[in-house]
Image (spheres, coloured by chain):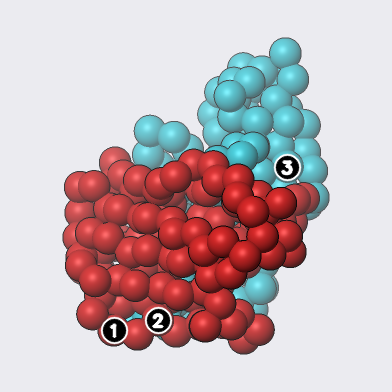
Amino acid sequence: GAVVSQHPSRVICKSGTSVKIECRSLDFQATTMFWYRQFPKQSLMLMATSNEGSKATYEQGVEKDKFLINHASLTLSTLTVTSAHPEDSSFYICSARGAGGGQPQHFGDGTRLSIL
Amino acid sequence: DAKTTQPPSMDCAEGRAANLPCNHSTISGNEYVYWYRQIHSQGPQYIIHGLKNNETNEMASLIITEDRKSSTLILPHATLRDTAVYYCIVRVFLQETSGSRLTFGEGTQLTVNP
């Protein structure tokens, strides 16, 4: 099946640091990529959607200057959490979908971000 | 996207069939039913999806009622590794638009017991 690779799987860093998370589609071209966030014991919440070569569309309440998304190619999207603070600690999950009919979204294994 | 309703938790004995229900009474004619599951601390895993016909793959079967207001995901022989949160999601399938994406509810915590 389709594979989405997310890196790193875990990050621990100090408050004020910027953190970049990579998401790659390994065996298909991802025309659309999605970034979700999940707090403990809660469901996934969509943060933003990006199409290759276009600016990301952010969900209401998500700061675009805080969470920078780049989708520069059909196989790579990055999420940068700028000047991270403890409240940004969460499980971040990317998802990708290919073009064409019948394509479901496939998910990476997530990045556990802990800000001290 | 149409709202879905799932029981918060279910238990199943190992080796037995697990039947997970989902209500989506406001579903529209062009909305698909998707099922995903999430094992603790991992990303969601795609299971199956369908529009109106029943579907089967190597993981599960999806039974959609004739009026499409509800569906059931069937894991024919549950194993301990099937313990996970199962999400039923209804989504309009649009090929290229960025407006088409999965919105997760609370899901059903399925626990498979030995």
- Whether tag 2 and tag 3 are in contact, CB under 8 A, the answer is no
Task: Tell me the crowding category of disc 1: few under 14, some 14 to 19, or many 20 or more residues within 10 angstroms, Cα based.
Answer: few
Per the rendering, the mark at residue A56 is 2
Q: In this view, does A96 lie above or below A108?
A: below
Which residue is more in the foreground, A84 or A53? A84
Residue at 59% across, 29% down: B82
The subunit letter for the residue under badge 3 reads B
Residue at 65% across, 50% down: A114
Q: Is residue B45 left or right of residue B39?
A: left
The subunit letter for the residue under badge 1 reads A
Disc 2 residue type (three-letter): Ala
- The CA span between labels 2 and 1 is 6 Å
Which residue is more in the foreground, B42 or A14? A14
Q: Is mark 1 on a helix, strand or loop?
A: loop
Q: Position of residue B113 (x, y in %)?
A: 74, 20
Quadrant position of residue A69: bottom left
Q: In this view, does A112 lie to the left or right of B62?
A: right
> Can residue A92 be spotted in the picture?
yes
Disc 1 residue type (three-letter): Ser
Q: Where is residue B72 in the image (x, y as percent from the top left)?
A: 60, 49
Q: Do discs 2 and 3 belong to a common subunit?
A: no
> Can residue B64 be spotted in the picture?
no
- Whether tag 2 and tag 1 are in contact, CB under 8 A, the answer is yes
Q: In this view, does A102 lie to the left or right of B57?
A: left
Chain drawn red in the picture: A
Residue at 27% across, 53% down: A25
Q: In this view, does B62 lie above or below B64?
A: above
Per the rendering, the mark at residue A54 is 1
Is the N terminus of chain B in the top left, top right, bottom left or bottom right quadrant? bottom right
Chain drawn cyan in the picture: B
Residue beneath disc 3: B109
